[in-house]
């Protein structure tokens, strides 16, 4: 609790955190592993670039990442623990925060988890063929739990890849470009200092520089360079991260299969984790998002589990912030959930709509009446939230 990147306490005790926090005890007690990761998240050795922070990262061969990988892989098939997913999320937060090449390491972990899942299915199928009546329930339970963990892991890794590329890689590209521009300016100042008394000689370097620019193409600077870098990151997210032959792409196909066939995959926890993973994958790529919006809103409308609907309502808000133009035609579907029978879902809808409207992410049109009806909701919290929303819109001058 008292450690922070500023005071350096966690960094100074990194070896102890790895040795004592990620030993065999971490495999037996995943809560212990999770809290160790909470401390490791504060081992940030950072430098400033304007308003942004740059992380000094460690090689993936560092013992920290080796032990984290071992804990995740060795406990993946442990059906007794219910803490694997929270520990996994914290472990990947550490990996993406501190590893020099988190994409390669996370991909390797996903591949090994998927291999364990496949091998366990083959082993269980051969077992159940010998003792079908005795092991059928146990086989199903093991398959569902591990598959649920694998899909949750894929969704969380995809989300961390989004943050890593959008923030860390983009900032690093900007840092490199600014350093290059500063070096060029220094060289130009040095050339200007050596003034020539010959007009021809004085103009020659400029002509040479212009010729070089014409041959190689002019490099972007300033805001134009930022835009070019942003376009590059968007291209990676849209076309590379979830491509079909990648590990995440293959797992994305599995997630779509599970979420689109609730009659086949009946386990509630499996469908809950799969639907949340689907939402996280949709945040990564505009192409994947557009292709699966229909499936997403079908689950939101028809899922009998309130937990799934409540999660997806929150996810809708994130999707609107990320892809407002793609989500705009589906706004009516969001308002429709104001009539959901579950109080928690209605609360989430009000919170999401209130935030989006007050931040001008969606426009209030004919649906304002649907919001006004919530003032008469039998639940006092929902009625109070609706009143607060209208007070907020009035103060912002959005009430008409």
Image (cartoon, grey):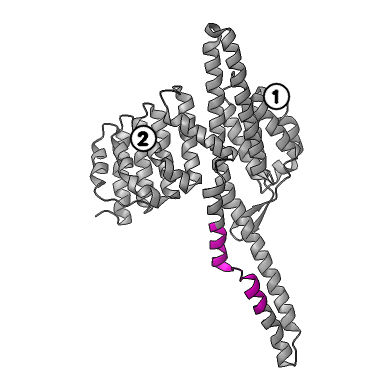
Q: Which residues are magenta?
A: 210-231
Residue 346 in percent (x, y) is at: 33, 35
Task: Tell me where residue 10 sits by quadrant.
Answer: top right
- Is 225 magenta? The answer is yes
SS for dot 2: helix
Q: Nearer the viewer, residue 276 or 255?
A: 255
Q: Quickly name the residue at label 1.
A: 25
Q: Residues within 10 Å of mark 2 (few under 14, many from 20)?
A: few
Q: Nearer the viewer, residue 356 or 228?
A: 228
Label drawn at residue 166: none
| Residue at 68% across, 33% down | 69
| Residue at 33% across, 50% down | 392
**Spatial separation of the CA atoms under disc 1 and disc 2:** 43 Å
Residue 180 in percent (x, y) is at: 68, 66
Task: Tell me where residue 17 sits by quadrant.
Answer: top right
- Is 220 magenta? The answer is yes
Residue 398 in percent (x, y) is at: 30, 55
Q: Residues within 10 Å of mark 1 (few under 14, many from 20)?
A: few
Note whether residue 372 is visible: yes
Label drawn at residue 298: 2
Note whether residue 39 is visible: no
Task: Tell me where residue 225 sits by quadrant.
Answer: bottom right
Residue 113 in percent (x, y) is at: 63, 29
Instruction: Work out whether mark 1 precedes mark 2 in sequence or the reverse, and give the earlier one.
Output: 1
Mark in the foreground, 1 or 2: 2
Q: Nearer the viewer, residue 238 or 341?
A: 238
- Would you say the magenta stretch is mainly helix, strand or loop? helix
Is 146 situated left or right of 102 in this image?
Answer: left
């Amino acid at each position: 609790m008292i450690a922070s990147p500023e005071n350096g306490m966690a960094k100074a005790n990194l070896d102890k955190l790895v040795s004592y926090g990620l030993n065999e005890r971490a495999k037996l007690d995943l809560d212990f592993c999770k809290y160790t990761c909470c401390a490791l998240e504060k081992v940030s050795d950072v430098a400033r670039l304007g308003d942004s922070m740059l992380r000094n990262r460690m090689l993936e061969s560092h013992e920290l990442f080796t032990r984290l990988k071992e804990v995740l892989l060795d406990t993946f098939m442990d059906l007794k623990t219910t803490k694997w997913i929270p520990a996994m999320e914290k472990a990947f937060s550490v990996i993406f925060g501190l590893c020099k090449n988190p994409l390669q390491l996370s991909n390797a972990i996903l591949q090994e988890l998927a291999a364990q899942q496949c091998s366990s299915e083959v082993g269980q199928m051969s077992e159940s063929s010998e003792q079908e009546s005795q092991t059928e329930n146990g086989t199903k339970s093991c398959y569902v739990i591990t598959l649920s963990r694998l899909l949750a892991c894929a969704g969380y890794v995809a989300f961390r890849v989004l943050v890593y590329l959008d923030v860390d890689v983009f900032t690093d590209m900007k840092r490199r470009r600014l350093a290059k521009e500063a070096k060029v300016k220094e060289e130009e100042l040095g050339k200007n200092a050596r003034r020539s008394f010959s007009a021809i000689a004085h103009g020659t370097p400029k002509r040479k520089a212009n010729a070089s620019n014409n041959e190689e193409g002019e490099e972007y600077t300033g805001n134009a360079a930022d835009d070019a870098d942003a376009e590059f990151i968007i291209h990676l997210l849209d076309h590379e991260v979830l491509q079909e032959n990648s590990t995440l792409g293959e797992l994305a196909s599995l997630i779509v299969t599970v979420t689109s066939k609730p009659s086949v995959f009946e386990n509630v926890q499996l469908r809950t984790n799969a639907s949340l993973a689907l939402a996280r994958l949709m945040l990564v790529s505009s192409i994947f998002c557009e292709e699966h919006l229909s499936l997403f809103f079908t689950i939101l409308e028809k899922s009998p589990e309130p937990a799934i609907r409540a999660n997806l309502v929150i996810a809708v808000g994130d999707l609107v912030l990320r892809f407002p133009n793609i989500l705009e035609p589906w706004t009516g579907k969001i308002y429709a959930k104001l009539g959901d029978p579950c109080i928690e879902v209605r609360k989430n809808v009000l919170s999401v709509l209130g935030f989006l409207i007050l931040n001008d992410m969606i426009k209030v049109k004919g649906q304002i009446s649907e919001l006004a009806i919530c003032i008469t909701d039998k639940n006092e919290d929902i009625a109070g939230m609706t009143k607060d929303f209208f007070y907020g819109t009035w103060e912002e001058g959005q009430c008409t």
